[in-house]
Amino acid sequence: VHRVAKHVSRYQSRDEEGNNRARILSDPRFALLICSTAEAMLDGAEVIKGVRKPFGARELSNVAWAIAKLNIAPPDTAMAVDTDKAEDFLREKSKEVRSTIFDIAKKKAAGEASPSGPSSWIPALSQLCGLIIDAAGLKSLNLDPRQFQQQELSNLMWALTTAKRPDERVFDFVVESIVLSSQSKNNRKEQMLMPQEWSIPLYCLAKTGISSGREEVLLPFVKELMDNEPGFLE
């Protein structure tokens, strides 16, 4: 999913030559890939010693980033964010998408539907993508913040903002984790020349209008970096 999103995001305009985003998103194979991704978030994907490994920090942030980049998930004004129940609905919605695709395939095989007929699973697929982003946020809350790289935290927050499905608890988690990470690096005398990773959370807080006081924690760290870290603004 991450690779598909990177391919699609190469193009600046939908009319640009080579941009096949619409064809990709309406392809039933893409929908089935999203279904498999949703199910892997619940059940794990990689099998190690007979046990399925659950999604970790990198997988969760990558999937959320990809869904947001594809611009297919509904905003919270169209489908409310309910992070706590996202996992409960994830498998059900995935089954709905799969069932719709297989029903259409049977009708096409029997000559009861046009081979070029509409992709009627798209609305359910969009909802599934929204649930994936919500579930990624919920699962991240249950991980140790030290499992995340700072880029992964920023990507997660960017994904929720870009998809217009922000969650205050996830934002709090990201900011708190970034601050703790910076304190740890500062104690080890490591440089923190990562302006993009610092600016993205501030942008997300401003863009969404979410204010829980976390910006008051984050801003002093960024100001200190700007003042004291040579090369931070380069």
Image (cartoon, rainbow, N blue to C red):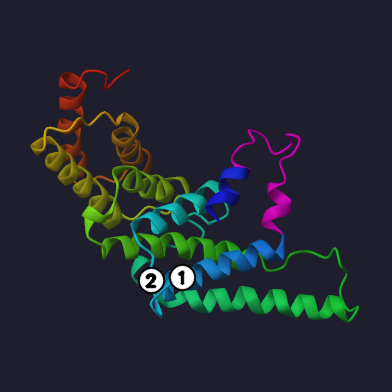
- Rendered image quadrant of residue 19: top right
Badge 1 crowding class, 10 Å Cα cut-off, few under 14, some 14 to 19, many 20 or more, is: some
Q: How far is the residue under mark 1 from the one under mark 2?
A: 6 Å
- Residue matched to label 1: 45
Report the side of 62 relative to 8 (left or right): left
Which percent across, then down, holds residue 121? 67, 68
- Residue matched to label 2: 53
Label 1 with label 2: CB-CB less than 8 Å? yes
Query: In which quadrant of the rendered image does the N terminus lie?
Result: bottom right
Which kind of residue does numbered mark 1 sit on?
Answer: Ala
Q: In this picture, is 30 found above or below 13? A: below
Report the side of 5 relative to 87 (left or right): right
Q: Which residues are magenta?
A: 8-26
Which percent across, then down, holds residue 127? 54, 65
Q: Tag 2, which secondary structure?
A: loop
As drawn, which residue projects farthest toward the right?
111
Is residue 79 in view from this perspective? no
Q: What residue do we see at 47% from left, 56% from top? A: 63
- Rendered image quadrant of residue 13: top right
Which percent across, then down, holds residue 139? 33, 65
Which kind of residue does numbered mark 2 sit on?
Answer: Lys
Query: In which quadrant of the rendered image does the C terminus lie?
Result: top left
Rendered image: mark on residue 33: none
Say whether residue 137 is magenta.
Answer: no
Which percent across, then down, holds residue 125? 60, 65
Q: Tag 1, which secondary structure?
A: loop
Number of labelled discs? 2
Q: What residue do we see at 66% from left, 79% from top? A: 99
The first of marks 1 and 2 along the sequence is 1
Is residue 10 in view from this perspective? yes
Label the magenta part by its dominant secondary structure: loop
